[in-house]
Image (tube, rainbow, N blue to C red):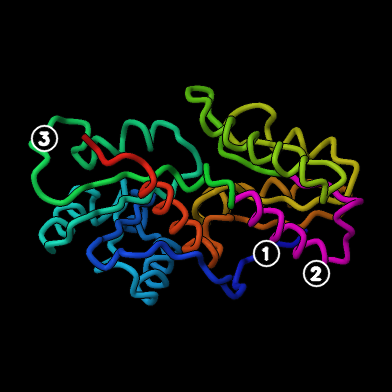
Amino acid sequence: MSITRLHSRPAPAIEPAGLTDSALILVGHGSTRGGGSNPALHAHAAALRARRLFAEVYTAALYGAPAPSDALAAAKASGVHNIYIAPLFMSDGQFARVILPRALGTDRPSNRSGPCVRVCGPLGLRPELTALILRRATEAATRAGLVPGASELLLIGHGSTRDPASHAATEWHAGQARAAGAFQAVRTAFLDQAPFLDGVLRIRTRPAIAVGLFAAGDLHAGADVPRLIAAHNGPPIQCVEAIGEDPVIPDLVLAQVSAAIREPAPA
């Protein structure tokens, strides 16, 4: 079993125009361990700052610092006309629908004074993510001497028995990957719901490329998935741990913003 950590050169972005009067806030899940550090989140923010598209790029974490409300207050105080909030979540689950609006204070009525605040759709629902998954999986197969057309693509999601959003997002990407036809088979597995990763690994009969649909290489992507994969013998398997750490993610963030721009302004 081989673990792939991503250091590829980013592809050119399709960059939305007219954002120099706007601020961008990247929001990650964060963690109560290690002070909520998220190196990938900060790396993505630095890459976007370097492009000089926005007046400022802020970071925030649901569990950690700065809090989304603090980042939003700083963005408002900067005097920009528009604020785009890009959740780097892999699905439209409870974190995106309930916890983030509560953390921002956007779940409560306001007088709508100040800049226009737009919350983008979650990163994990972007169709461009499927293309990135296939690209990285194909590269991993090539490096390992595997033929994608004779191998299986295994998409690993978090999953939850309380919220179907993670399962739905993972299955959507799996469906798109099957339609692309690059791999002999595409299968899904989850950490917290069936089909569980451990069980799927037991029945594998083909070489596989596993891609973790995780925003960061934290406990799940960096520890749980490699541990479970290492515990099983069988055909070769390569693992791309956390697709959300890929250096091309800033391009997908710009796609999030472009989609938000096309939406009607909040009332």
Single out the mark in the foreground, 3 or 2.
Answer: 3
Identify residue for label 2.
143
Is the stretch drawn in magenta largely helix, strand or loop?
helix
Q: CA distance from mark 3 to mark 1?
A: 46 Å
Does the magenta portion include 131?
A: yes
As drawn, is 105 to the left or to the right of 52? left
Is label 1 in contact with label 2 (beta carbons under 8 Å)? yes
Residue 76 at what x, y percent from top left?
A: 14, 56
Q: Amino acid at mark 3?
A: Ser
Residue 124 at what x, y percent from top left?
A: 52, 45
- Describe the element under mark 1 as helix, strand or loop: strand
Does the magenta portion include 224?
A: no
Q: Which mark is residue 110?
A: 3
Question: Earlier along the polypeptide chain: callout 3 or callout 1?
Answer: 1
Q: Which residues are magenta?
A: 129-154
10 Å crowding of disc 1: few (<14), some (14-19), many (20+): some
Question: Earlier along the polypeptide chain: callout 3 or callout 2?
Answer: 3
Q: Is residue 161 above or below residue 19?
A: above
Q: Amino acid at mark 2?
A: Arg
